[in-house]
Amino acid sequence: MEYNTIVKKITPHTLRVAYLYPSIYEAMLSSLVAHIIYFMVNEYFPEIFLERFCVKKLKGTEPPPRSIDTQSSLKDFDLIITSLHYEPDIANTIRILYAAGIDPLRKKREKPILAGGPAIMANPHPYTEFIDAFIIGDAEEAVPEIINIWIQYHDSKKLFLEEISQLGYIYVPGINDEEKIYKKPVQDLNNTYYPIKQIQNTEKEPIYGKGLLLETSRGCKFWCRFCMETRIMKPYRYRSFQKMKNIIEKGIEINKVNRIIIYSLSFLENREEQKLLDYLIENNFSASLPSLRIDRLSEDNLEKIKLLGQKTLTLAPENFSYRVQRIISKYFKIDELLPIIYRVLDKGFNLKLYIISGFKGENKEDIDITIEKIKNIAEYARKKGRKLSITINPLIPKPKTIFQWIGMIDLDKAREIINYYRKMLRGLVDTRPYYVNWAWVQASISLADKTISRVLLDWALRGGDLGSWRRALRENNYSTEYVFEGYRFGEELPWNNIVLGYGVEDVLEKEYLMYEVLSRKSSYS
Ligand code: SF4
C-alpha cells in the first residue's frame, strides 16, 4: 500500500496530466525525477491533478494502462509528460500508448506528449515522430514554466506547441527544427524544488531499496571521454550541507524511514558531502551510496562509509591499462588503484567492479593487463573472504562524446572479448557481462537520426525484445552501420541543433584529436 500520495477531487474543471514512467513500478519508486514531477506539479498547480503511469512488464503486450492514483484510463488525460532515461525506454512508451488506444505518432494525435531525460537531451531526433516537444533542461525549471503555458493553451495543441517553442530550451519538431536549442539547467540546487515528501510503499520494494532519496549533487566535475551523463548534466552543482540536513530532518519524519539513499554521479567530491557523511554517522543513519570514484576512498572515508552500514562498494575503474585509461580520460595514477582497492577489501567491504572493455583503441595487451589486475584483486578478495563481482560492458558510443565519430567495435568481436574475460576469470570471480546485443540496441537508437522511427514503432509493437528488434530492422530494411563506423569527423550531426553548453561542444573536436594520437596502437579499429 502506498502512502504520501496526493488526493484531489476530480471535477469537470480539473486539468488532468499524466506522468508516464517508461519502466516498472519498482523503478519508478527509485526515480527522483518521478517524485519531483509528481509532487511539484500537484503542489504548484491546484487546478491540475497529475497522476502516474508505468509499465507492467518490460516486453510483450501491455494491458490497458490505468493510473496508479485513481485507476483512470490514460485516454482521460489532457497532457502526457514522460522522461526517457535510457534510449530503449521509447519502446515502453510506445507500448503503453498503444495499449491505451492512443496513437503513438504525434501527427495523428490530438493530445500533446512532452519528454525530457538524459536520452532526450543528448539526441531527441530518434523520437521526433512520437513526441511533440522535447525538454532540454532540468525538470524543476522547465516543467512549471511549460505547465503555466499549457494552462492557457490547453485547448489547442498547435498554439501550445508554438508558444513553448519560443522558450529557447524546448525542441518542437516541425516548428523550430532550424533553430539551436540551448540547455536550461537549474543553477542553484539549494533554491530549487525538492520532493521531501516521497511516495513510499509498504509492500513493494523500490529497486534501490526503501529510504529517503537524497540528491547531493548533479553533474560531475570530470570529463571521462565516453561519458554522456557528465556532458548533459554540466555544470557540476551541489547542495549545501545545511540544505541536505533540512531535507533529511523533515524527510525521515514525513517518509517514516531511517535510511538515506544518496544520488550523485560523483559523490564525495565536495566539502558539503564530506560534512554530510559525518552528520549521517553522528545521527546513526544507515545509507546507500552510489558508485564511487576510487581516488576518493581514503582510509577515513572508508571507515565512515562502513559505519553507515554499506556492505558492498560499487567502483568503476573501467580499465586497468594505463594506456586505455589515458584514452578514455579516467584516472591517471594507475599504480595507486590497486592499493586503494585492497584497502576497500581490508576494511571488510564486498566489491562490485565495472569494467569497460571492447572499444576501438584498446588492444589485446590492454585486455590482458586488465585481466591480470582483476586476478590479483580476486586473489586478494578470496584471502580476505570478501565477495567480488565484475560487470564487463562493451563501450556504447553516445552522442556528444568523441565516440560519436569512432563508433562501436564489431558485435562478434565484443562477444569474443567478453567471453575471453569470462574464460580467463572462470572460477576466480563472478563475472556479469552486459548483454552485447542490448549495447547495440542502445547505441543504434542513441546515434540515430529520425529515420529510425519506423523501426522503433515496429519494434515496440512487436513487443520490444531483442528478437523483435532484429525483425524490425529486417522488415524496415534499416542498417545500423553508423553504430560501427561512427559519423565522419566534420560532417553535420543529427543532434547539432542541441547545445549543451558549458564547454561540451567546444572541447569535443580537440578531445577527438587527442584520442587519435593516444589510440594509434590498436588491434580493434
Ligand atoms: S567520473 Fe563517472 S560520471 Fe564523472 S565523467 Fe567519469 S564516468 Fe562520468
Image (tube, rainbow, N blue to C red):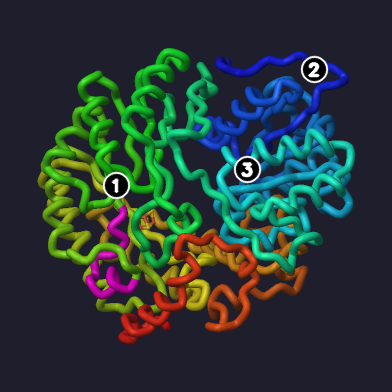
Residue 10 got which mark?
Answer: 2
- The N terminus: image quadrant: top right
**First in sequence: mark 2 or mark 1?**
2
Residue 292 got which mark?
Answer: 1
Few, some or many residues within 10 Å of mark 2 (<14, 14–19, 20+): few
Is residue 352 in view from this perspective? yes
Residue 107 is inside the magenta segment? no
Image: magenta residue range: 316-327
**First in sequence: mark 2 or mark 3?**
2
**First in sequence: mark 1 or mark 3?**
3
Vertical placement of 479 versus 501: above or below?
below
**Which-is-in-front pick, marks 2 and 3?**
3
Q: Are marks 2 and 1 in contact (CB under 8 Å)?
A: no
**Which-is-in-front pick, marks 1 and 3?**
3
**What residue lies at 85% left-to-right and 40% top-to-bottom?**
101
- Decide which of 483, 166 is in the foreground and name it: 166
**What residue lies at 73% left-to-right and 41% top-to-bottom?**
96
Disc 2 to disc 1, C-alpha distance: 45 Å
Vertical placement of 13 versus 151: above or below?
above
**What residue is shown with label 3?**
142
